[in-house]
Image (cartoon, coloured by chain):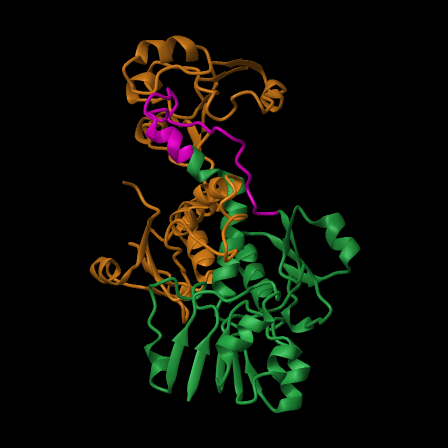
Chain colours: A orange, B green
């Protein structure tokens, strides 16, 4: 069985092993093929004869899918599967999978890290301390930027799916109130510190807004 | 009534108002007096005749307290009251107060901000993006340092009082397990993701250690 990874570099720049796939067949890994859809010919050439194609960002259009008669399975090495023409795959009975939760906690953690950098400017203060400004400060107490306390403030979260909820949990643990906007409302998630609102109210009330949605 | 603030600068470098105190008496605010205990004479001179003395870091030793016959109240403008000789104050019937919770959420937030800076190097990545490295990256995906995901990792917290618990709540929301060590154990706080352990086990098991205790 021929297995082709069209753009392995993003997932595995060298620190992971593809061995698990090698056990299932004849594996070829390309670092990149074409991200912008302009080289359908190259995608088809590389995936020819493949029963299994793995993609991260390389677009598998209807034309590509219809040009690969052996294809039985498309594995998207990411969460969003907008790079695959699902309808064309369905017509051919090709199974398409994605990885919906690999990044839930990591993305929420990153969103909070970005927020805390704005509140604390850790890197800049670290540099200042290394330059001796703390040691030479007469009060052992100073700040180069205003420090922002989040407790008691309100975070608006647009898109309250898995990642939005994970961000919301951390925000609440920081003492924040959470206002969520989503097409799908799950009232079970509401509490003293979290409720769903309309977008207008979210925008009017929030001190901080986190986007966990398609842009 | 004479009110003296011995070292107002740390609390109020200029962005707060002392007006609330002015309403109660004749207020004098010194930016700093002496932090290291070497100028008891200056402390006594400045606090002479005062019924109310407010201090942040200036030490009120037995000698100082015994030299201030009018003194009725010492307000510590901070959490730790180790700067006041409590025994000497008690003998004189002088009331001493501190501010035990003004920094609970702020300190916990700062501890997590420091941890997330180590996990994400937000400032360094921000600089890299501003230099155009993201725009020119062929994969729209890179990192200058390894990124560390906290979910599933273990935080050991030494000192599980108010601030330690606040840090522990955020850590758990980040998907971490918390091991706490404290002289005072409150079993009610334990859960699937938090338990008390002995110090040796904490040091052996923790991926990250937070100190919320006297050093």
- In this rendering, the answer to whether A190 lies above or below B119 is below
User: Hey, which quadrant is residue A203 in on the image?
Assistant: bottom left
Quadrant in which the N terminus of chain A is drawn: top right
Residue A102 in view (yes/no): no
Say which of A153 and B36 sits in front: B36
* Residue B137 place in picture, x, y as percent: 37, 22
Q: Is residue B203 left or right of residue B79?
A: right
Foreground: B14 or A162? Answer: B14
For the image, the number of numbered tags is: 0
For the point 60% across and 81% down, the residue is B65
Q: Quadrant of the C terminus of chain A?
A: top left
Most extreme residue toward the left, as rendered?
A: A200
Spot occupied by residue A56 in the image (x, y as percentages of width and height): 42, 26
Q: Position of residue A148 (x, y in %)?
A: 38, 57
Q: Indicate yes or no whether the magenta region holds residue A127.
A: no
Task: Characterize the magenta stretch by its predominant secondary structure.
Answer: loop
**Residue drawn 33% across and 30% down?**
B130
**Above/below status of A191 relative to B209:** below
Taking the spot 55% from the left edge, 69% from the top edge, the residue there is B58
Q: Is residue A67 visible?
A: yes
Tell which residue pokes out farthest to the bottom in this image. Answer: B93
Q: What residue span does the magenta drawing correspond to?
A: B125-152
Front residue of A195/A101: it is: A195
Residue at image location 41% in from the left, 60% down from the top: A149
Q: Position of residue B103 (x, y in %)?
A: 49, 66
Q: Any magenta on residue B132?
A: yes
């Amino acid at each position: 069985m021929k297995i082709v990874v069209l753009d392995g570099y993003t997932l595995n720049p060298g620190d992971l092993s593809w061995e698990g796939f090698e056990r299932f067949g004849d594996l070829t890994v390309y670092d990149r093929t074409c991200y912008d859809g302009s080289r359908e010919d190259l995608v088809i050439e590389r995936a020819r004869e493949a029963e299994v194609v793995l993609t991260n960002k390389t677009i598998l259009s209807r034309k590509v899918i219809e040009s690969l008669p052996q294809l039985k399975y498309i594995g998207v090495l990411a969460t969003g599967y907008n790079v695959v023409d699902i309808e064309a795959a369905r017509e051919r009975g090709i199974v398409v999978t994605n990885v919906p939760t690999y990044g839930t906690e990591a993305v929420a953690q990153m969103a909070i890290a970005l927020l805390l950098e704005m509140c604390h400017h850790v890197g800049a203060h670290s540099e200042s301390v290394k330059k001796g400004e703390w040691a030479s400060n007469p009060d052992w107490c100073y700040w180069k930027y205003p420090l922002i306390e989040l407790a008691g403030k309100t975070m608006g979260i647009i898109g309250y799916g898995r990642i939005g909820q994970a961000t919301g949990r951390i925000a609440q643990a920081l003492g924040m109130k959470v206002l969520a906007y989503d097409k799908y409302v799950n009232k079970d998630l509401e509490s003293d510190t979290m409720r769903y609102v309309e977008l207008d109210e979210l925008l009017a009330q929030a001190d901080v807004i986190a986007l966990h949605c398609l842009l």
